[in-house]
Image: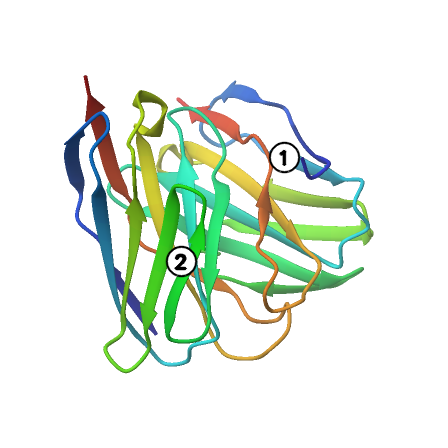
């Protein structure tokens, strides 16, 4: 099975940097995804990590340590529109669509002026 | 944006009635998924499909059935709806390559009274 933990809520100030952590214990691992979900909307893809290290994409970066079962999403130069829920998801098992995603419960980020 | 359409977008019905939700895609992706999202639980996989007439159960499949008679359509049926199935339902699709994310539809908000 899979167990994925994220903080429930975080607050930060516009222009600041925030790090959202995700830890996982899984029976198989084939990559970790981060999604953003604004209230009342669908989740949208942010980043993907399968190898250890940092992936940078504009203001957003994601880090993975497979040996520690740990990932974080780093958001820089926070904007009000970054207020949303951030979902960590782990892909299990095989290297195909037969593998499924298990999602954490999400971290609600509130950015204040 | 991935071409995914969920219908209906909102539905209110009574306990014991049958309900069918539809997911339609125009991306010709092989893999399709149904999730439900509830406060305190996050996104949980109900059923998924890896091809026409090929489906499998997810984490919370009890009380749900699915069908996929053609590539573009994936139906989720609640044979006899219960109040515990009140939720937001998301459909997702993927092309099956390991580094490619699942893309989500806009969701169906289902209330069972």
> Label 1 is found on which chain of the structure?
B
Image coords of residue B36 (percent x, y): 45, 43
Image coords of residue A39 (percent x, y): 37, 25
| Quadrant (top left, top right, bottom left, bottom right) of the C terminus of chain A | top left
Give neighbour class at mark 1: few <14, some 14-19, many 20+ (Cα, 10 Å). Answer: many
The outermost residue toward the right is B70
| Quadrant (top left, top right, bottom left, bottom right) of the N terminus of chain A | bottom left
In this rendering, is residue A21 above or below B72? below
Image coords of residue B73 (percent x, y): 77, 44
**Cα gap from disc 2 to disc 1, whole angstroms:** 24 Å
Label 1 sits on a secondary structure element that is strand
Residue beneath label 1, please? Answer: B21
Residue at x 68%, y 65% (from the top left corner): B96
**In this orientation, does residue B90 appear?**
yes
Give neighbour class at mark 2: few <14, some 14-19, many 20+ (Cα, 10 Å). Answer: many
Q: Relative to A31, is B34 on the left or the right?
A: right
Residue at x 64%, y 67% (from the top left corner): A97
In this rendering, is residue B10 above or below A53? above
Residue at x 34%, y 30% (from the top left corner): A82
Q: Which mark is residue A89?
A: 2
> Label 2 is found on which chain of the structure?
A
Nearest to the eye among marks 2 and 1: give it.
2
Label 2 sits on a secondary structure element that is strand
Are the residues at dot 2 and dot 1 in contact (C-beta closer than 8 Å)? no
């Amino acid at each position: 099975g899979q167990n994925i933990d994220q903080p429930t809520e975080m607050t930060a100030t516009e222009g600041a940097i925030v790090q959202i952590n995700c830890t996982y214990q899984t029976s198989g691992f084939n990559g970790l995804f981060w999604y953003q979900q604004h209230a009342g909307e669908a989740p949208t893809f942010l980043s993907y990590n399968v190898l250890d290290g940092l992936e940078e994409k504009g203001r957003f970066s994601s880090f993975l340590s497979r040996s520690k079962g740990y990932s974080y999403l780093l958001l820089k130069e926070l904007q009000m529109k970054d207020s949303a829920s951030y979902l960590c998801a782990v892909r299990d098992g095989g290297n195909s669509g037969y593998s499924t995603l298990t999602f954490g419960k999400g971290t609600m980020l509130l950015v204040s002026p | 944006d991935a071409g995914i359409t969920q219908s209906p977008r909102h539905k209110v019905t009574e306990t014991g009635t049958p309900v069918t939700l539809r997911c339609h895609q125009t991306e010709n992706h092989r893999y399709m998924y149904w999730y439900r999202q509830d406060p305190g639980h996050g996104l949980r996989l109900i059923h998924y499909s890896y091809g026409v007439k090929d489906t499998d159960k997810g984490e919370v499949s009890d009380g749900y059935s699915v069908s996929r008679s053609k590539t573009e359509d994936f139906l989720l049926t609640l044979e006899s709806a219960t109040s515990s199935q009140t939720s937001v339902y998301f459909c997702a699709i993927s092309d099956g390559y390991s580094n490619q994310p699942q893309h989500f539809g806009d969701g169906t908000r289902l209330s069972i009274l």
